[in-house]
Structure formats: C-alpha cells, structure tokens
Image: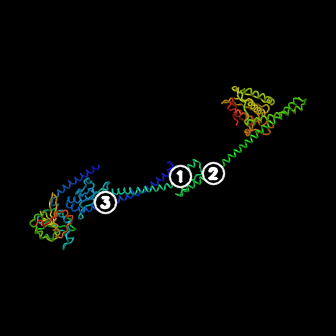
Amino acid sequence: MLRLHARLGWLVAAGLCIAQARGESALSEYQVKAAFVYKFATYIRWPPRTGLDASSPFVICVIGRDPFGRELDAVMHGQNIHGRRIVVKRLARPEEAARCDVLFIGSSERAALPQILDAVHNEPVLTVGDMDHFAELGGMINLTTEDNHIRFDINKGAIDRAGLKAASQLLGLARIVDEEKVR
Amino acid sequence: MARSSSIGRKLRWLSILSSGTAVLAVSVTLLFVQIQRARKDMVLRLGSVTELIALNSAVAVDFNDADAATALLSSLTTRPGVLTAAIVVNGRVFAIYRRADVSFPKGEDLQITNGSRFTDHDVTVFRPIVSGGRSLGTLFIRADLREIEETWRWFAAITAFVAIPALLIAIVISQLLQRAIARPILNLASLAKAVSIEKDYSVRAPTVHTAAEIEQLVGTFNHMLSEIERQHAEIQEAHGTLEQRVADRTSELKQANQAKDRFLASMSHELRTPLNGIIGFAEFLSDGKPGPINDKQKEYLGDVLNSGRHLLHLINDMLDLVKIQAGRVDLTLERFSIRDAISEVCTGVHPLAVSKAIEFTVNIDAGIELVTLDEQRFKQILYNLLSNALKFTDDRGHVGIEVTPLDGGRFRLVVSDDGIGIRPEDIGRLFTEFEQLETGTARRFGGTGLGLALTRELVELHGGEMDVESEIGQGSRFGVVLPLAITGGNKMGGQA
C-alpha cells in the first residue's frame, strides 16, 4: 500500500515535469531574457540620484536593434521595481543612456559598445547584454545560452564601480568574470 | 501457611502497587512533556534551517537555476537527521535532495506551502520561498524523529537507572515497615490458634511498640486471655467441688441405704420370731387343745390370728422387697404350665371372690402353654394383682385375667376390674412403697402399701415391664409384660 502510494507520487511528479518542460519550451528565448532583466533589477540596489525620488519612474532602456519585440513591454507592464513604476524606452543615441536605470545593449551594437559604455561610465546604470564577452568587455551582466538554459555572467568590478549593489545570492548564481582577462 | 501470610502479602502488594503507580505516573508525565518539547524543538530548529535555505534559494528559483538550487539543498548532507528536501515550484519539483535510502516525496508535499507535519516516522517542515514580495515556490525539509527517539532512550535510561531503583528501594522500605505491622498480627494469630488447640491460657503475646493500634490489639488479646484463664480456673474449681460433693452425697446415701436395708432385714427377722410364737399359740388355743373355750373366746382368738397373719404377710413382703432392692434375690427358673399356675392362684383367691359375689373370668391364649420363669414369683405377681383387684372391686363386680402373646418371645398378662379406679394424678405414685392412696381408702380396704411396689420389683427382676391404665369409677387394668422364657443371661434383668 505504502509502496503503491510512493509510486503514485512518482507518477504525479513525472507528469508535472513533462507539463513544465513543454511550457518552458513554449517560452521564447527573449520572453525569458525579458523576465531576467526584470529579476536582475529586483536583486540590485541603486544609489540615490539627485533630482529623483521614489515616485520617479524606473527606466529600462534598450539601445540598438530591439531583440525583444513586444516581450519586454509585456513583462514590465504594470510592474514596479523597488516601488517605482517601470518605463521602457528605446534609445537611438548613446548620450541618452545616462538617464536610464537599466540599459540593455543588443548584439547589433557590438561595434558601438565602447562608446555606449563610455556614455554611462561612472553612472549608476546597470548594463545588460547578450553578446559574446560582453562582461569581459566592460558590460555588467551578460546573458548566455547553455544547454537550452539561459545563464548569465557578471562583471562584479563594473557593478561596484557604478555604485550598484548586487545581492550576494545573485552573484552566487552567476559566472563571475574579470575584464582584464580580455584586454 | 499460605493463609497466615496473606496479610503480609496484601500489604506487600499494596506498597508495590502504590509506589509503582506513582513512579509510572511521574515517568509517563515526564515522557509526555519531554516528547512534546522535543517535537517543538525539532520543528523550531528544522524551521529555522528551512527558512535560511528558502531565503538563499530564492534567487536560484527566480532565475530558474535548478543546479544552483540542488547544490544549495545538498548542503543538508551535513545534517544527519534530514531525510529529504525539495523545492516545489508551481506544483512541480524544482530541486530535490534525498538520502540514498529515502523514497521520493509524497504527493501531498507538493500542495502544502507552510507549517509542519508529523507522521509516525518523520517530521516535515514547509516554508514558502519569497523574493521581493513575490512567492516563488515552497521548500520542505523532512527529517527523521531521532530527537524523539533520543527522548525515548532518555526515558529508558531514567527508568532503568532512577525509576526502577527508586521503586525497589520504596518496596524494600515498605517491606520493612510492613513487617513491623504484619509480624505482630501473624504472631497473635498463631498464638490464638495455639491457645485454642492446647487450651493453655497462661501464655501471653509479647508487647510491641510499632503501632498504637497493634499494641492495643495485643494488650486486649492478653487481657482476654487473663480473663479466660481466670474464669477457666473458677469453672475447674467449681467443677471439682461439685464432683466431690456429689461423691460425698452418693456415698452417704449408699451408706444410709445399706443401713436401712440391714435394719429392715434384721427387724423383719427379729419380728417374725415372736410373731410365729403368737400365731402358733393362738392356733393352739383356738383348736381347743389346752381346754375348751367358749364362742366369744374363739372369736377373739380368730381376730388375734388374723392380725398376726396379716402382720406376718406384711413382714414377708417387706423382707422380699428389701432383698430384691439389695440385689440378694436369685430367680429359681423352671418350666411350668402357665395355665396351671393361674388356676392355682385363682383357687387361692376364690373364697374372697365368692364372698363378694364377684364375677371372675380367665382368658388365656391357646398359643401360650409352657413358660420358663420363677414359678413362685410369677404366682406372687398374679396373686398380688388379683387380690388388689378383688379388694378394690365392689360386690357383684367383675374381675378378668387375660394372657396374650407378644412379639419377641414375650407375653402380656392383664388383670382388669370394674372397681373404684385410680385418679390420674395418683397413678405415678402407685408403685412407691408405703404410699397409700387416700388414707380413707386404705383403711376401708386394708392392704400393706407394699403390694404393687413389690410386684413391680418382681416383674422387673424377670426382665419385664409393668403398666397401668385406670379411670375413676370405671375400674383399672394392670398389665404385665414378661418373657416366655428367661435364659441365664437376663436372669437379673431390670435390677440395677
């Protein structure tokens, strides 16, 4: 009786796993990445900025060709970060990036990456990208794909220099990289 | 012995049960409290571990990093009591840790989000995984009940090293106390038994000072014994005195009786000698041997003769009676015809019957002919009864003799009359020597007062019995039951 019960438990659990696996595969890569961008923001603390308060919107910017399509807006819609309303902006020029809280740099901007990073240098802007060696090149968080799973690298030095504070648990999940290695 | 020790055994059981119950109650209460505390502690400790891991695993869950979450759960390996742990997200297992010998979590584990669950073998603590106010899933950790088992072991140790020795000590102490109570009672019981068997009232129970009640019991018992001893002695003494008195009186009476017998025997003898002289010379004179006498003189001489003969008769009766009572009479047994013997006696009293015109009937059963008795004594019995009947029957009355056989080799002789009869209250005195019913009656009918007493003695000498029934004015019936033959053995029957 007990053994039968345990076996039923197995079956139930296995069934759930299959259902979940299908659900995950149904999610597109950029749906997951959009969610990651939101979650990164929840594990990172921004320093207070002059002229901004809790009622100011939390600005998430995308520079370059937008790979998310509508997914980013869908994920962020109606959400807030640390009590601040989320606003999603598309930027054309790097100079606008200094006013952002999160800056997503698409892989189309690989060539313009040094200028863009310069534009937010010493500003509390979390830079997120999904191109090879983004973190090693001075970006803060790079989204990678590994065995069909989205993972991320973190350049802790860049985050510290920007005055941001990442939760230790977040760092624990990431692959920590160093920009000196590449240079 | 089993019975005599029952009070001791009862007291022993009493002490074992009472102290055992107390120890058991305390132990069980302690065990219960301890187990409750152990459960609470387990839930607290396991709960804090679960909360910590839930906090640390939030990011991994958030970023869907099952490997990181699994690694986190693997840190539970260092905790030996943990059986399994799992993170459940949206009703499915996200990450799991389990010891090699533990089966997969149960179905219900996937539904519960908070709290704790106990089963017989394990405890499970559930905690939600929360990040930034968002509920991400549930972590549960299941641990075995080794802490509870620890408590059981602790209980066993307490029982073995404290409770049982304490119980034993309590029993030993109560045993000693119980002996102080039971032993005097048991001693008392055996002493009481000994006293009742041996009737020795001089023993005393030793005084004890263990308990006031028992001391009192022993005291009362001893007092009772003294009282019994005293009364016993008094009774013994009275008994002795009484026996002595009875013996004295008996011997006095015996002596007096013997003296009386001797006196009567010698008196009768001494009286007969001069009486024979008187009668002899009176007959001599009456016969006119010395010379002629006139009618007047002859009449007076007749009176002298009658009186003398009556006196002689009286003296003979008395002598007989005394001899019989003194046991100095032997029966002379001979075989004779009862019919002839009765006929002879009837002839003897015939003149009297004729003079009073009394009708006389004799009825002898044909089956009775020869008997073996003392013939002279038998005739004496019949003569006495007949002369009595004739004496107390008025003129033209009726006197009957009847002889009938009885069972057991006996026969019954009845002499009946229709005379004056006897009052019921006088019947009891009939056979007493010198007792005469109504002085007036005696004077009118004459008689010595010895007849019936002598008759009864003679009957009893033959081993027979005598009875009488009578009604005033209707007559009397004197019955005699005698054996048909007397063998040597009961020759003296009926005589003490």
Look at label 2 and name its amino acid.
Gln
Which residue lies under the disc numbered 1? Answer: B187
Which chain letter matches label 1? B
Colour scheme: rainbow
Residue B429: image x %, image y %?
74, 39
**Chain hosting mark 3:** B
| Observer-nearest of B294 and A7 | B294
Numbered label attached to residue B34: none
Q: Residues within 10 Å of mark 1 (few under 14, many from 20)?
A: some
Same chain for labels 3 and 1? Say yes or no. Answer: yes
Judging from the image, what secondary structure is the residue with disc 3 in?
helix
Q: Which residue is mark 2?
A: B231
Three-letter code for the amino acid on which mark 3 is drawn: Val
Q: Are marks 2 and 3 in contact (CB under 8 Å)?
A: no
Occupied quadrant, residue B90: bottom left
Chain ID at mark 2: B
For marks 2 and 1, give the CA distance: 24 Å
Q: Is residue A64 visible?
A: yes
Q: Is residue B74 above or below residue B329?
A: below
User: In front of the other: label 2 or label 1?
Assistant: 1
- Mark sitting earlier along the chain (2/1): 1
The C terminus of chain B sits in image quarter? top right
First in residue order: circle 3 vs circle 1? 3
- Residue pointed to by mark 3: B43
Residue A24 locus on image (x, y percent): 18, 57
Q: Earlier in the sequence, mark 2 or mark 3?
A: 3
